[in-house]
Image: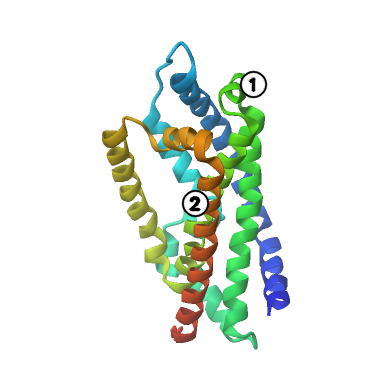
Amino acid sequence: MLQQSFWLAKKEFKYHRLSLLFTVLFTIFYALLISGFLNQSVKKMFGPDMEPYNFFLLDFLFVIITLSLSANFMSGPYLSLRAIKEDPFSKRMAMLRTLPIPVPVLSLSRTLMMLMTLLVMSTVFFGTLAIALPDPFFQHIGPGDFVFFILFWLGCSLTIGGLNPFIEYGTNGKILHLTPYIFLVILLATITVFYQLSDLGLVELILLGVKSNGWILALFSLLLGTVACYFWNKILTIRLLKRDYD
């Protein structure tokens, strides 16, 4: 089953290579923008000059892109409101269901596509950050701490990313476009609550956390992401078995 799913995922991954290229380019731009805020954050927390910066904007930009690394967000369905009515992901799955392909293979192929996208985009995003961040940043956040920082957020991406295939192929165009707004409200509320409780932003808290408990945070996040990914795949399989495309 794994071999069949991987073959199907690889075929579709190649089919979307143009939109993936635009997603890569946008991710690089986003990483370059965030690197400036991230460097200012470290200066503010650990530097002698206590340079002010907009922690809210850093949290907003960083979490938004991190939770989007598993999605080909520059593809047509994400950019066009026509997807609400046309529901291209459901049409694609309806076509695939007519082929002699077992549902678990289809479900696993969607999850593998998500993982392949996450691998590429996370490498691009965090690789760009590592290159763009100046040397003084790594005087405060050592290379080992930065690796734990990356692994923590990678686990977060995997936790939410596992939901993407379910939203795309297990729901419809309305849910696809409504979900980002739901996450946006949750994110804004979370940032506000954390700052009120600790006077620190989310990214600041993780930067401080990896300096003292980096491997614990990274391991917990990756384990949570793995379990969540497995869970969402099972839910998608059940949904595809029951869904009527007539």
Q: Considering only vertical position in the picture, is 146 above or below 73?
A: above
Query: In this image, 13 relative to 223: left or right?
Result: right
Residue 89 can be seen, yes or no: yes
Residue labelled with disc 2: 156
Q: Considering only vertical position in the picture, is 97 above or below 213?
A: below
Quadrant in which the C terminus appears: bottom left
At x 64%, y 21%, the residue is 135
Tell me the tag on residue 2. Answer: none
Q: How many marks?
A: 2
At x 66%, y 45%, the residue is 123
At x 44%, y 86%, the residue is 242
Q: Secondary structure at mark 1?
A: helix
Q: Which image quadrant is residue 25 in?
A: top right
Query: In this image, 151 relative to 160: left or right?
Result: right
Q: Position of residue 185 (x, y in %)?
A: 30, 49
Residue kind at label 2, given as amino acid type = Cys
At x 45%, y 63%, the residue is 83
